[in-house]
């Protein structure tokens, strides 16, 4: 029945607007695969303590979450923090995002430690490749404010991960030089280039458009490399109805979908949360050709779709 909104209408509006910006930047980047699992990994070392406490981390979380809203059909983002070790936290979704940092992190009063990258990277590699593999990619957004103490182990994990559908976006924040992350971006010995590094002194000082453009930099190129090297990044769609439901639910939070079956067609009626009708997706039988009849935003319009992913252009 669609995605439930938070209880905060201002936050809902922010997320919705930012998800639209993510969509625009993804289209500009010509990203060929519109589904991914999104994982957020954040530094929990002592030097980050002030950013957790002054609201900076909560703000960053609210800006990163729309990336998961766009790519993840469950509209959910896994969250790990790391210092000398790591911890997996509750997933970030509409039910949990409001006041997440205070509730899930600061209230636990856990020690802020040192900085090791490899343990949490190894856990992500193990989880998404061995325990819970999928044909769609896993997009890891990894934010740190300092260099690490386990450089050899980090290089080994990244090299192993280059054989699988894991893309690593390393973001250095603050005034650190990040010489190691810069070298990691060009690490030799990998099957394919599976990582990109950017440095941002102050995330709050850049626009959402700039942030999402930087986050998606090199992702499209990596997808091409995966396909050329036989690494799966696009699951076969055997259930177009489920695919349509996932795409529409991510694009219109809280929407209502109703199916109507006839002998020659399946119709999926799409309603906004306030019961206004957005349109109808028609799936012909046999053949499975797709058409969207869009009712919202003016005179009705019909769009022939080459695949379910085409819906993204018109919602």
Image (cartoon, rainbow, N blue to C red):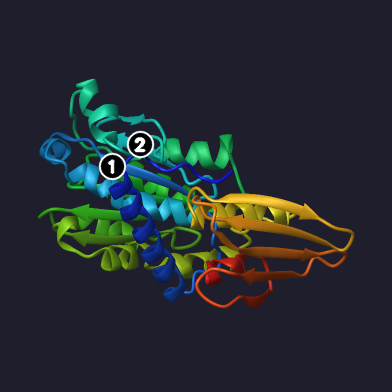
Q: Residue at x 66, y 77 (%)?
A: 302
Residue that badge 2 annotates: 80
Q: Residue at x 19, y 56 (%)?
A: 203
Q: Nearer the viewer, residue 241 or 92?
A: 241
Rendered image: mark on residue 42: 1
Tally the marks.
2
Image: 295 above or below 249: below
Residue 304 rendering spot, x and y as whole percentages = 69, 76
Considering the numbered disc 2 on the image, is that residue within a helix, a strand or a loop? Answer: strand
Residue 153 rendering spot, x and y as whole percentages = 35, 41
Residue 265 rendering spot, x and y as whole percentages = 82, 62
Image: 2 above or below 110: below
Q: Quadrant of the N terminus?
A: top right
Look at the image and tell me whether residue 202 can be seen.
yes
In contact (CB < 8 Å): disc 1 and disc 2: yes
Image: 224 above or below 202: below
């Amino acid at each position: 029945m669609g995605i439930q909104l938070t209880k905060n209408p201002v936050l809902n509006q922010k997320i919705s607007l930012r998800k639209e910006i993510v969509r625009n930047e993804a289209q500009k980047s010509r990203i060929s695969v519109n589904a991914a699992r999104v994982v957020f990994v954040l530094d929990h070392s002592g030097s980050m303590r002030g950013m957790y406490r002054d609201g900076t981390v909560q703000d960053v979380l609210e800006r990163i979450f729309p990336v998961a809203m766009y790519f993840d059909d469950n509209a959910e983002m896994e969250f790990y923090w790391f210092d000398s070790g790591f911890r997996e936290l509750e997933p970030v979704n509409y039910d949990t995002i409001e006041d997440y940092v205070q509730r899930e992190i600061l209230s636990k009063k856990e020690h802020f430690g040192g900085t090791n990258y490899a343990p949490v990277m190894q856990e992500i590699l193990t989880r998404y490749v061995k325990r819970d593999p999928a044909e769609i990619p896993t997009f890891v957004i990894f934010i740190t404010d300092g260099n690490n103490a386990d450089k050899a182990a980090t290089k080994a994990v990244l090299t192993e991960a280059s054989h699988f559908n894991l893309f690593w976006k390393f973001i250095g924040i603050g005034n650190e030089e990040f010489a190691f992350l810069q070298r990691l971006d060009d690490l030799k010995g990998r099957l394919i280039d599976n990582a990109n590094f950017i440095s941002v002194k102050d995330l709050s000082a850049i626009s959402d458009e700039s942030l999402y453009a930087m986050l998606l930099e090199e992702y499209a190129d990596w997808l091409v490399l995966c396909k050329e090297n036989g690494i799966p990044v696009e699951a076969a769609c055997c259930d177009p109805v489920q695919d349509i439901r996932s795409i529409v639910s991510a694009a219109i939070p809280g929407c209502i979908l109703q199916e109507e079956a006839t002998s020659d067609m399946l119709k999926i009626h799409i309603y906004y949360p306030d019961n206004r009708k957005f349109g109808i997706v028609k799936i012909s039988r046999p053949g499975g050709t797709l058409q969207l009849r869009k009712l919202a935003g003016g005179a009705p319009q019909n769009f022939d779709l080459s695949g379910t992913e085409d819906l993204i252009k018109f919602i």
